[in-house]
């Protein structure tokens, strides 16, 4: 953004007919454009995370339904795994909610946290699938 302001300022110096008000207007337009881009990027990211949330929720629900087919000696461990996955799913959903209500400034910080929560959940689901259905 600083470089954008420098370009505007330099072009203002080159063209002496440009007024301070015109430069200020250009700067305001640039700031609004950057804000609009950030909001658009945030909305796209939210769509991706919400789709991933729905996918992981479906996987967890499927595991919960298949618990009956697991041998009795593995049942408690399987239930604990599914409960752990549901807790991770809730954490992921809370991060999505935070992102939905975040300002542009908080967006970048939340993006990293939600990425981490999603990755953690996906790895846990993959591991649980391998453990559940290895027999």
Image: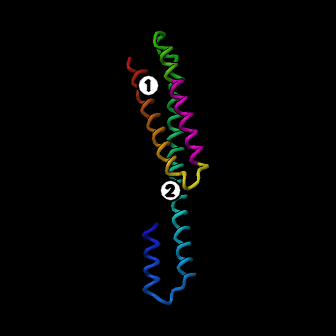
Q: Give the magenta part as a residue range.
A: 82-99
In the rendered image of this protein, does residue 27 appear above or below residue 95? below
Alpha carbon distance from label 2 to label 1? 33 Å
Residue 15 percent location from the top left of the image: 45, 87
Which residue of the protein is positioned furthest toward the top in this rendering?
Answer: 73
Residue visible at 40% across and 21% down in the picture: 131
Q: Which residue is mark 2?
A: 41
How packed mark 2 is, by other alpha carbons closer than 10 Å (few <14, some 14-19, many 20 or more), is few
Residue 2 percent location from the top left of the image: 45, 68
Q: Quadrant of the C terminus?
A: top left
2 or 68: which is nearer to us?
Answer: 2
Q: Is residue 94 magenta?
A: yes
94 or 28: which is nearer to us?
Answer: 28
Quarter holding residue 133: top left
Q: Which residue is mark 1?
A: 128
Sequence-earlier tag: 2 or 1? 2
* Secondary structure under the numbered disc 2 in the rendered image: helix
In the rendered image of this protein, does residue 36 appear above or below residue 15? above
Residue 7 percent location from the top left of the image: 43, 75
Residue 11 percent location from the top left of the image: 44, 81
Residue visible at 51% across and 53% down in the picture: 44
């Amino acid at each position: 953004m600083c470089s954008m302001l420098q370009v505007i300022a330099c072009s203002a110096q080159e063209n002496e007919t440009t007024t301070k008000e015109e430069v200020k207007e250009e700067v305001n337009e640039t700031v609004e454009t950057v804000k609009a881009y950030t909001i658009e990027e945030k909305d796209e990211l939210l769509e991706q995370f919400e789709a991933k949330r729905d996918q992981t929720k479906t996987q967890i629900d499927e595991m919960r339904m298949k618990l009956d087919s697991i041998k009795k000696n593995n049942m408690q461990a399987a239930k604990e795994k599914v409960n752990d996955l549901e807790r991770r799913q809730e954490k992921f959903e809370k991060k999505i909610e935070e992102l939905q209500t975040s300002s542009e400034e908080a967006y970048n910080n939340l993006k990293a946290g939600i990425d981490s929560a999603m990755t953690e959940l996906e790895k846990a689901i993959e591991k649980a699938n391998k453990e559940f259905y290895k027999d």
